[in-house]
Image (cartoon, helix red, strand yellow):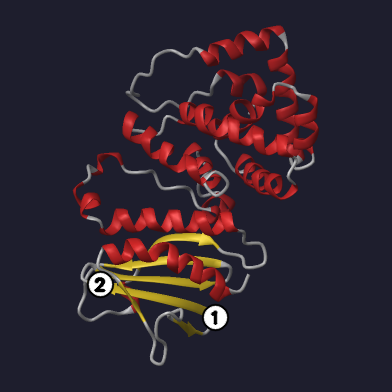
Amino acid sequence: MQINEALSLIFNGLLEYLSSEGFSAVYPEGVESPELPVTKEGNKTIISFSGNKGNVKLVHEDKKLSLLTTEVTEDLEDSDFKSASVSLLNLETVEDSDIKYIIDEFSETLRETYSEKAASKNTNKKIPTPVSKSAAKSGVASYDPNTLATRLFALYPETKEYHRMNIEKYGEFLCEEFFQNYIVSNVINTIRSKDTQKNKKLFNILNDIYDNGTNETQSLIVVTILGAMNNDADLLETAKKYMDKTLAEPVVATNQILASSSGKSLVKKLENPPLYKPKKKKSKQKGMFSQMLGI
């Protein structure tokens, strides 16, 4: 896919919302609609919008597409723009589903930034900020369950709204409930499909986050998500093709344990958890599966 083709799809996908909020595309000199209002600055490809609520830029550079926004300002400088969202846009591998994800992600971010409804929304239940790859790789932070959820939005964009609803309902991210109800079935279906490209994308995420994740996050991947293969030989054989050794070993062991009689009783406990109670204090204690598996 060429850059202008990809940007045209994203531009048209965002245009209806931006127009409804009073934004108009900024056309460079000599360019008129229906041409794409693209400008070039070195390696950057840029589309700009302006309106009475602020300014918006789409900037493609180095396989990434950034959404930049500003509030209303008279003397606009590049330094006034803030990064609102960033998505991978690799033209060599991009698919229609990736374009749709970017449109959905950027549309939601723009609504949160500019719509009157967003301005009046209760801000006590903000979506947690995911841990960045650079922070995880440098050891400054470890991937948490929220980051695992947000990374999986790229594969399962329909789950993003359920993630938000989960936080709004409980006042925090109740990860076990979210993954059990909205992620597990999607992951199992991906593995069962044996689609090479989809499985590569899935396990690239799971391998990375497992290697650099907290104990709780590792337990979610090994037990809650991949433990749901229920020791199915066909599913495990497919998953092994894409799992790194560090992930494959605990996943295989967990599936064997859960298939045993004692493991089945543990599964029943998971299926009938105690009623949710708000946390009084964050606990560092590992879950029973983390202790059992030493992860």
> Where the N terminus falls, by quadrant?
bottom right
Secondary structure beneath disc 2?
Answer: strand
Seen in the image, is 129 located left or right of residue 53?
A: right
Which numbered tag is attached to residue 241?
none
Closer to the eye: label 2 or 1: 2
Contact? badges 2 and 1 (CB < 8 Å) = no
| Amino acid on which disc 1 is placed | Asn
Residue that appears at 70% across and 44% down = 199
Residue bearing mark 2: 51
Label 1 CA crowd tier, 10 Å (few <14, some 14–19, many 20+): few
In the depicted view, which residue is nearer to us: 22 or 182? 22
- The number of discs equals 2
In the depicted view, which residue is nearer to us: 136 or 27? 27
**Above/below status of 200 relative to 134:** above
Residue bearing mark 1: 43
Residue that appears at 37% across and 53% down = 108
**Above/below status of 258 relative to 91:** above
Spot occupied by residue 56 in the image (x, y as percentages of width and height)? 34, 70
Mark 2 / mark 1, whichever is N-terminal: 1
In the image, farthest residue toward the front = 34
Seen in the image, is 194 located left or right of residue 223?
A: right
In the depicted view, which residue is nearer to us: 114 or 251? 114
Residue that appears at 32% across and 23% down = 280
